[in-house]
Each structure stands twice: as structure tokens, then as C-alpha cells.
Image: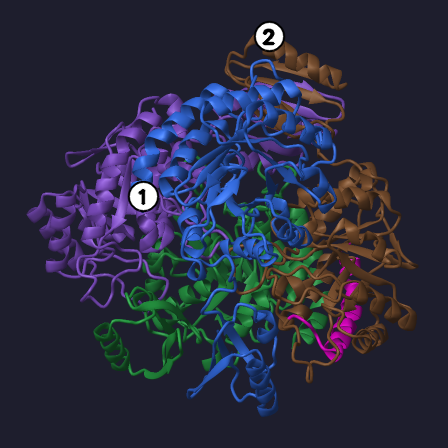
Chain colours: A purple, B green, C blue, D brown
Amino acid sequence: MIVVLKDNPNQKQLDNLIQWLKSLQLEINYSQGKNTTILGLIGDTSTVDIDLIAALDIVADVKRITEPYKNVNRKFHPEDTVVDVSGVKIGGGNFQIIAGPCSVESLEQIVSVAESVKASGAGMLRGGAFKPRTSPYAFQGMRDKGIALLLEAKKVSGLPIVSEIMDLSQLSLFEEVDLIQVGARNMQNFELLKELGKIRKPILLKRGLSSTLQELLMSAEYILAGGNGQVILCERGIRTFETSTRNTLDLSAIPLLKSMSHLPVIVDPSHATGLSKLVKPMALGAAAVGADGLLIEVHNDPVHALCDGQQSLTPEAFDELAECIRQIMPFAYKANH
Amino acid sequence: MIVVLKDNPNQKQLDNLIQWLKSLQLEINYSQGKNTTILGLIGDTSTVDIDLIAALDIVADVKRITEPYKNVNRKFHPEDTVVDVSGVKIGGGNFQIIAGPCSVESLEQIVSVAESVKASGAGMLRGGAFKPRTSPYAFQGMRDKGIALLLEAKKVSGLPIVSEIMDLSQLSLFEEVDLIQVGARNMQNFELLKELGKIRKPILLKRGLSSTLQELLMSAEYILAGGNGQVILCERGIRTFETSTRNTLDLSAIPLLKSMSHLPVIVDPSHATGLSKLVKPMALGAAAVGADGLLIEVHNDPVHALCDGQQSLTPEAFDELAECIRQIMPFAYKANH
Amino acid sequence: MIVVLKDNPNQKQLDNLIQWLKSLQLEINYSQGKNTTILGLIGDTSTVDIDLIAALDIVADVKRITEPYKNVNRKFHPEDTVVDVSGVKIGGGNFQIIAGPCSVESLEQIVSVAESVKASGAGMLRGGAFKPRTSPYAFQGMRDKGIALLLEAKKVSGLPIVSEIMDLSQLSLFEEVDLIQVGARNMQNFELLKELGKIRKPILLKRGLSSTLQELLMSAEYILAGGNGQVILCERGIRTFETSTRNTLDLSAIPLLKSMSHLPVIVDPSHATGLSKLVKPMALGAAAVGADGLLIEVHNDPVHALCDGQQSLTPEAFDELAECIRQIMPFAYKANH
Amino acid sequence: MIVVLKDNPNQKQLDNLIQWLKSLQLEINYSQGKNTTILGLIGDTSTVDIDLIAALDIVADVKRITEPYKNVNRKFHPEDTVVDVSGVKIGGGNFQIIAGPCSVESLEQIVSVAESVKASGAGMLRGGAFKPRTSPYAFQGMRDKGIALLLEAKKVSGLPIVSEIMDLSQLSLFEEVDLIQVGARNMQNFELLKELGKIRKPILLKRGLSSTLQELLMSAEYILAGGNGQVILCERGIRTFETSTRNTLDLSAIPLLKSMSHLPVIVDPSHATGLSKLVKPMALGAAAVGADGLLIEVHNDPVHALCDGQQSLTPEAFDELAECIRQIMPFAYKANH
């Protein structure tokens, strides 16, 4: 960490600062230029509160040289983390497609989708029971009933299940859910992250709509710092000025996150684009760029259902996508390793 | 609401759609052009799920003509809402400055700040007990202890207190807090919003870092739809590409929100800019633009304290700011009414 | 186009509006609801100035149903345009890699890079002669001298050359340049676009840093409306809040642009990411998503040169990238067709 | 400037780097930590190409401590620059309102607007002759004819005139224009900026839609480096995700630009918001925040004209705005000084 001091710093404040920094076990390299005085802090600065230093009267600027995250940092954990979701492995060369409907709607629906995506090669079943909706008047999900139906579908299909938690108070309902999803809007729900750090169940952490990669890793750090190392990161689009897609899918996040961290990284092209016609090309792109998996929305009966999410694929379209992914994966894997 | 159909829509699907729309008590105006067929939906569309319609196979596009919010809409509630925070009024011509430290640190600190900001004319005392921090290693606030100290400061100073809730589980601790703040990161914590709709206590709802004004109003709608009409909106900066300020303070949000809604709108220049030198000019700007109040960070002892938040003002600087605001307000109010 | 009128519009103004719309050969569908009156405009609205209508006193809102672009619109030109760059075809199933250094620096450098990228399979040679630089103190390119060196490299290697024009006054220097690049900062230099519409030479049009896809197409429309149909579109990253890459490469732009327009779409992963380690994965991603080509920076002698652009590849790394692309292309093409 | 080296840098490359830096007259402070080696560069780094250094193999990161701009930097020119536009002063305590129509449409129109805005207190007349339009089918301005009409209006009213140049080739037409405007889309048209640096006429430089404040200053630096010190900066809104205003007016740019630079800063609330109802409040906000002037669109005959720019004020509304500004200015000035 580099601390740039203002011109002619108050000596007493400077002494206080240096004394405090030393108390944090940091070595200090003092460099006095004609106009600028710089303190180079050497040691473990990941736990230093950068805002605290930046706020000092005598400080002009503080710049990090090393990362503020530690447990998720690939530097200190060079091998890929492989997350085990009830026997289904993801990361470290294990590629998985997680598929299923946006919302659980009925037993028939979820079982039918589960069986069809399993047949197409999906490794896990997703389904929303608690739905974050912008409007209080929009469908909020089947809630505990939805979780129960997912568990039925798991029993029938044998697929591990993934569902989103929206509040700490729902945690007990997720006991038999195999992979707990933290949605984009909750990526910085720090109280929730702390609790998820205490359990021993894999977590799927989605990037917030306006979160930097470093903030995503800091949120993962909350979970790992609590003792739970089984975290999967998910890129799902960021908010930009472009309005022709719902969000802008940032595929460069994949190689960057994988260089910064050892955690697996998957991609959700359905929510990112909001358009079913973009799901296949962006899924292929994600695989080519080096993702460890995909999260794809699949709906079973778009012809008769009133609501066929405009971002959902039919089982047939999903089957074709899965086949294309299988064909492209060996080349993508080879190119990225 | 305008529903634009694709060319040659499937007749059966079209019949289903029209039947369903009629079941929602909407009148339908069918307009057939050479290339485009349009359904105009007339009636109360605020509770219609636009995504649901957009997702239909036969639909090319859906565009709202009327707003998706109702309780917060000025159209249906033309007079300004005046929020009463334990006797201190805000909105409808009542301008208030809420001031205090970022974090509650000690009894001495909070009481001293409370007394000084009261002397300068602040109407309420703010102080953080639960602190949302990007890093798990940063100071997380004094939590329940902090709330207790705030209550002490309230007793001494007579100022109503404002503090941020971070999770539903903390709600019981906020029983004597006069105004509950929902932070930017929780603006779309819908489970929390629903619960806050059930209580009878004013809520200060901050705009999310990447939330549109409409999304902010939809989050307020969650609270009002639950029966709690005492909501204050707060603009606190949005995330943009510009990095010289922490966020970009969007002052145009003030007149826009006030034309869209009857709720009071205040501004937090401290968090928005992250730079103490910008707090006064942006506070003046907010007042001139028509804000109903300000949220200002004030720290009591910046000289000796190690941590003087770089966005905090000293009590002296705050006193000067408050005086400037008092001078500019009559002209601002006249100009905006 | 849908014109939503305000409540109780002034009848005379409404008559004026309707008369004017009819003079534009538009058919008008008048739809009177209880609260909302809507005019549906049917006919060729691509040349209607939407701002002009939106600005009218009696108009509440105007919404386009059809696109504001015509010549670039795939609807009116369903087959892919194939651009012919001095015999090298791009688009319509023809995939090309354009490679070369950021700046032309010397004859030796540009010839050496030309020969090596040709050997690796590049179809064209790029090189900057005029360099848009944020700072007046940064290297501004070799200018006319650089163009001359590119022409030498073209003679030696046989590769068509691509270079960026920065101002109309440079046009005469580009007579023998095979493909003229319009950079991101000039995407809305409308005087330049108009002139480029008058010449008969292919144009490579880069998306602006903060331009929507529709704006990119409108800029291409300027060139096509002038009579020059040989335009290649290039996605090169947009400006967002994320700072870990220079820009955010928006790969979803590829399938969207190709559905909106018949023009070829290529991707520049070097400038988008600004990091050489991301060039290969993002190039693979672009190919998988369906791009018609790539623009890749290659530098010949990174060990001895002081300035090895941090986004440039060595010839060896480029050779490996090109080989990976060749392997993945058949699968990508099949998946996207 | 701080150069952070990678672990175990190649000694020969390091020697080359140090030798080269010394040749730039920079003093080098070498600081060797356990894991990190840092070079502190002391001296005039404003002309150092940061990308060039960042691109080196042995370099992990480069961070600027001092600004990359020099002529526009307040550090080296502490007093406010006062720009003199044919006798009308702006900056250094001189506040000016520049008003007029978006486009020059006729002699009658421009003379009428000129006289009315002069009567209301405007110091200069603006009017577009060359109009940058997203669509090739939208009105492109009266061009040279428009400039001629502006000159007529100048003769009649005595007001200095301001108009936008879109291309170098138009420069000769601007000989009698008192203040040449460079629009947002041309902020980084570096060839244009270089030429404008050579003339002796004040320049009004608008911030690009996605330009940082530093980039705006670097563009101004192009003009000042060329020898033309008469530059006025203009904040006119930036592109963000928010769609309820055309752009997001960033009023914090005013105090920041004025602390970074000595140049005057004005604000264009008309283009920024795109909504006439927001022009007055945002103009008041700009004045309160410390702007040196305003750029306001005024149209003369909105009742009969078909096109009343939705961002334009009537002369009556402008007169009221100007009066409010006059009342608020003394308090704003006192507060900000």
C-alpha cells in the first residue's frame, strides 16, 4: 500500500500515523521527494481499512498495491477450487450446466423440466421459489411451497437443486437445497453473507448489477472468512447505458476472476441478456472464454403457458444448446489451458 | 399500456391473450395497421406484470403509457406528503437537515456531535450502528451498543434519531429509533421492505447505486402498499464511469421525483461525493434545486481522531453550511414554487 | 410510431399535427381511450424526426415501433452483406483476422509484423499512422510517413491494409489504404461520415465508447445513405463503471447487430480489454458468439522494444490464437447458423 | 509517478527502464520491499506516457501521483482565468448567461430571440448553424446560412455570438463568431483541438458524454498547449444507466473542475436533462454550486411553431429564470468563496 502525503504534513499527525501503522505489523518505507512524500507499507495490508487512512488530514492519496482479499486470492491458493454439490463437481476442469425454470410453478412443471434437462445433460436443476421482483404487484414466487416442489423434483430426477435465498429468515427452508444462490441484489447483503459463511453448504454468489469484480470477490471473502470455502461465482450482466439487452454480459469477467481467484466461475446468459435468442450464442461465448459452467433458464411448455419468460428456452432449444456446448468444450478447454 | 404484436400472430394465442387481459378488467383497443397490430390496454395497468406479456410468443414489444406505481404516484395524491418524525416535520415546505457521524463510536462522541449539530440548526441526529462494509475486515459498527448510545444522545439533545437497518432480524432493536434508514445496498431487499410496510414508523429510503428513479419509487411502493405511508426518499449518488467522485450525485432526481411522487426528497452529499470539500457546494445545489432536506456527515474531533472520514465536516464547517442553507432557502423555495 | 397525447389536447394544435403527419405520407390510426389518446403512425417512419414530435406541447410521449434506420436494416436486406477489401472478403460466412501493431514505428517493424501475421493466417494488416491520444504530450503517430510505410508493407506482404482516419483533411492520404477505419471517438463525427459515404472504399466503423447499438447503426446509416454500402461494424468495448478492464467488451452486440443489420460485425479484444492476457480468451469468445472477424494487436519485438503495448500479442502468441480460432470456427459457425 | 515492478524483474530490462527514465530528467527513488519493488519518479511527469511504462514486461502497475495536465492546472496558475468574449467577461467572479435557440431557423427568429434574451440579461447569444444529429435524416442545421443569420442578430442586438463547429473545414466560417463551441461529440476530436489551439479566439469546450473530468482537462490542455489560453469548460450531462433524463447532469463537476483548473466552468441544463421543466431548477442548482455561467436554450414562438424543442424555454420562462438566478447569485457566490 502506498500512502502519498500532502505537502508539509503536520509532524505530530505524521508521527501518530506511522506509530499506528507499525502497530499493525507493517514495515514502512519512507520516501521523500522534492514535492511528494510517500510511505510504502510492506506486509499484510489485506486487513487495513483504506478509507481510514485516506481520511487523514495529512494524506493526499492511498493506493493499494496488493489485493484487499485474501482467502479468495489465487496467489495464496494457486490450484482451482472444485466445489462439490452433492456429488456433482464444478471447477478445476469440471464443467456443469445448471438448468431449470425461472419460477417453480407446479409439481408437473418442475418435474417435467427436471427430467428433460437431465436428459439433455444438465448437472443440476435450478428453480426460483422466492422471487425478487421490482414491483410489489408482480408474482413473488411460491416460497416454501416452491422449495417443497423442488425437493420432489430432486427425488424424481436425482439432480441436485439450486434456489435463491432472499433473506436470512428463510435459511431453515434451505436445509435440503444442494446449492444456495445469493442473487445480484443481495451480493452486498453482508448480514446474509456472514451467516452463509457459517454453514457447510455450497453457495452460488451472483455479481451485483453495479458491482466491480473486486467487490464480488470481497463479498465472496465474507463467506470464506466465515469458514465456508465452497463458493461459485456467477457473472450475470452489469448495468450500463445500453438498453437493447437487459444488462451487459461481461464475459471478460471470466478470465479475470479466474486469474484473481481460485473459485469456479459460471455465467448466466438468460438473465444477463433477457432475450432467449441471445442465450445460445452467449452460452457458447462463455464456454469459449473459459467458464466453468452455465446457468440457463428452461421452460417446459411455452406454447400453452401464458408466461414463457422471454429469456427462457424450450427443452428442445436447450437440448441443442447443450449439444453445441459439448462440441465446443474440448477446444475451448484446450485453448484456455 | 401498448402491446405491439408480431406479424401474423397465431390466432389462438391472440384470443388467449385478449381473454386474459379482459379478465384483468382492462378495456382493449385493437388497432390493425398494414404491418403492425397494436393492442391499447385501457384501465388500471399498474398491477399488470409487463414481463409476463412481453414474454409471449406473439408479442413484439410492450410499452407502458402509465406508471407502474400507484400509492406513491403524485397523480393520485397531488398534495405533498409531510412526514412526521417524532414531531419534526419534513416535506410540504418543511426543510430539515439531518446530521451526525458516519459511525457511532462512543457516548462522548455522539452526545457531543448531537449537541453541536442541534445548536447549528439540525432537526435530527444520524449515526450508524450497523455499517455495511465492502470488506469483512473493515469496522462493522458498534451494532446494538451503537443504538443504545444513539438513544442516550437523543435523550440529552432532544433530537429524533436516524439509523440504518441492515437486516430484518435487527428490527426489534429499532423500536425507539425515530426514522429507520434503508441503505442503498438494501433498496431492493424486498423482504425487508415488506416488513417495513407493516410497521408505523417513518422510513428513509436511499436510492440504490444503480437504481433508476422508477425502481426507487417501486421500492417505496412496497412500503406504501403494505400500509406505511411515511416514506422519505433520498438521492445519494449513482454509479457511473466517473471516478473523481465516489458516486455521481444526480440532483435532477429531486425535481423529477417530486413531479412523479408526493413523497419528500432529501439529498446526501457526503456519501455521494465522498469528499468533504464538495459537501457544502452540493448541499447548496440540492437546496436550490428544491430538496426537502439534507443528510450531512459531521465528526466532532477531526484533529485528534485518527479517523476523520474524508467525507465528514467538522462542527464548525457544518455550522457555516447550515447558515448558508438558511440564507439561500427562501430564494430557492420561491423559485421552485 | 406511437404518439401518446396529453389529456385534453388543444384541438388546433392537434389538427396541425395530424395535417403535418399526413404530409409525410403517414397513415394515422386515432385511438381514443378514457384517459389517453394515441395516434398510431403507419408508413415509413424512418425519416421522421422523433424529437420534433416529442417536443410538441400536446404530446406526452412518442415511442418508435419500427427502427429509425433503413439502409442498414436487415428487414429490407435479408442477406448478409459481404464486404470486399481488395479481394479479401468478410461477412456472409467469410471470417477474417486483421492484425498488426498499434502504431507504425518503422519500415522494419511493419514489414516484419506483416509477414509474420500473414504466415499465421491474418487476412489484412492493421497499423496506426494517426493516433488519437488523450494527452497532447503522448506520441501522435507517424502520420503521412506511417501511411507510406504501411503501403510498403502491403507491397511486400500482399496483405490489404487498414488504418484510422482522424480528420476529413487526411482523406487524400488514404487513397491506397484498402479499408479506412473510423475510430470510436469519431463514430459520431457526422461530417466525416458524410464524406465517407461519397467514396467507394470499404469503411471499418468502430462503436463509440458510450454509443448504443442503435446509434452505431445510425452512424453506419450516414455512410450507406451517402451511397457507400461497404461498411464493417466493430465492437471494441463500452465505458462502464468496471475498472479492471479498460472497457467492457459487449459480445452480445454481435448477435444483436447481426439480427438488426446485414453488415458484417467484427470484434477488437485488444483495445476493449487493454490487457494482452485477455486477448485470446475474448477472441475465442467473439468467434463462438458469431463474429465475422477479429482485430488483433500484434507487436514484433516485445523483448527489446521499450514499448510493448500491454494489449499487444507477440507474433508467437498471435500464431497460437489464430490456430485456436481455426479449430473453434467450424463449431461456432455451425452453432450460430 | 509510482512504478510498481513485478517480482524478480529481469535486470537488463530494469536497467534499460531506469536509464530511459533518467533521460527524461526524472529523479528515481528506488524502494525495495520483501515482495514489491517500487520506483518513485520525481520531477515533471506530465509529459510522460503512462501507457508506455505500464506496457513493459517488468512492470506490474503504474500510478500517477501528479496530474497529467499542466497548462490547465490550477497548481501552476492559482488565479481564475477570466475569458473575454468580445468584451463580455466570464470567470473570476463574472457570471454570464448564454441563451438562444437550439438551431438558427430564420432571421426573424434569431433576431427576436436575441433581443428578448438580451432584455432578460443574457450576456451572449447562442444558436446552432451546424447540428450534430444521430440520424442522417434529421435536420442538419442551416450551416453557412445560419452563421450569416447569427451575425445579423449580433449586429442588431450587440450580443457576442456562440456557435458550434463540427469540422476543421468550417473554421473559416467562424471568423466573426465570438466564441467557438466544441460539442460533446467532438471533445476528443484531437485534430480540431490542435487547430483551435493555434487561433486567438475563445473556445467553449463541452464535456463528452462519457468523458471523465480528467479527460475534459486533457482536451483543454490540447488547446492551451497550442497557445490559446481562452477556454471555457462546460458540463452538459454524462451518459449513465438512468433514462428518465436524457443525460445525468453532474453538478459536482463544477467545484471539482474549479479546484483542478483555473478555467471558467459553465453548465448547460437544457441539453443535459432534455426536459424544459428541469431547466430552471438545475440552472439554480448550477449557480448555487458555483458555476461561472449557464447555457440555456430559448425558443421564441412555441405556440405557433411546430417544433418547440422539449428542452427549450419560452422567452417568458427564461426571463423568470434569469431573475431567480440574479436573486440567488449573491448568496451562492458568498457561500462558495
Q: How many marks?
A: 2
Q: Nearer the viewer, residue B65 or A221?
A: B65
> What residue is disc 1 on?
A283
D234 relative to B154 in the view: left or right: right
Give x and y (percent) for residue B64. Answer: 42, 72
Q: Give the residue at mark 2.
A: D12
In the rendered view of the protein, which quadrant contains the N terminus of chain D? top right
Q: In this view, which residue lies farthest toward the top?
A: D12
The chain holding disc 1 is A
**Mark toward the viewer: 2 or 1:** 1
Position of D332 with respect to D12 (left or right) is right
- The image shows residue C148 at horizontal and vertical percentages of 69, 29
Tell which of C150 and A291 is nearer to you: C150
Mark number displayed over residue D131 = none
| Range of residues picked out in magenta | D311-336
Main secondary structure found in the magenta portion: helix
